[in-house]
Image: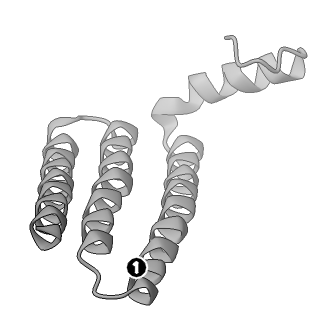
């Protein structure tokens, strides 16, 4: 009976993760701007891989493999948003379409409004 419960949890988390990853791919092709595409990819990547790895944790044969998978989850949840932020910052700083927004944001910061109100 316990094996069936583990199997159901594993299958449910794997299916949810694959669904989120497929939706993320659709979002990457649907959106027009690079930042929107990157946001869809980053969110789908983080959440989709999280669900897939949780599913693998449920199917792990021993506690050590489960612990390694949890460490992989922690690493990916730290590294993926940081990498996405750096890519987004590069896009904003190098693409002239965002120049007006960056200039307004810098002026707002220089005026002392650090709450992000433009």
Q: Quadrant of the N terminus?
A: bottom left
The residue located at (34%, 51%) in the rendering is: 47
The residue located at (9%, 67%) in the rendering is: 4
Could you tell me which secondary element the residue under label 1 belongs to? helix
Percent coordinates x, y for residue 50 in the rendering: 35, 59
Examine the rendered structure and indicate whether residue 21 appears above or below residue 37.
Answer: below
Using a 10 Å C-alpha cutoff, classify the residue at mark 1 as few (fewer than 14 neighbours), some (14 to 19) or many (20 or more).
some
Percent coordinates x, y for residue 26 in the rendering: 13, 44
Percent coordinates x, y for residue 75 in the rendering: 54, 70
For disc 1, the marked residue is 66
Q: Quadrant of the C terminus?
A: top right
The residue located at (48%, 60%) in the rendering is: 80
Residue closer to the observer: 76 or 111 = 76
Examine the rendered structure and indicate whether residue 16 appears above or below residue 99.
Answer: below
Percent coordinates x, y for residue 27 in the rendering: 19, 41
On screen, residue 44 versus residue 79, left or right, reads left
Residue closer to the observer: 72 or 63 = 63
Colour logic: one colour
The residue located at (32%, 64%) in the rendering is: 54
Examine the rendered structure and indicate whether residue 75 appears above or below residue 30.
Answer: below
């Amino acid at each position: 009976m316990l094996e069936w419960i583990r199997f159901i949890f594993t299958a449910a988390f794997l299916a949810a993760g694959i669904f989120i990853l497929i939706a993320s791919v659709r979002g990457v092709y649907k959106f027009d701007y690079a930042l929107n595409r990157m946001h869809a990819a980053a969110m789908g990547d983080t959440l989709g891989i999280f669900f897939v790895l949780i599913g693998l944790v449920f199917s792990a044969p021993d506690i050590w493999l489960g612990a390694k998978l949890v460490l992989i989850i922690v690493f990916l949840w730290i590294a993926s948003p940081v990498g996405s932020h750096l890519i987004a910052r590069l896009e904003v700083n190098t693409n002239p379409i965002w120049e007006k927004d960056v200039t307004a944001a810098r002026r707002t910061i220089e005026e002392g409004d650090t709450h992000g109100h433009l």
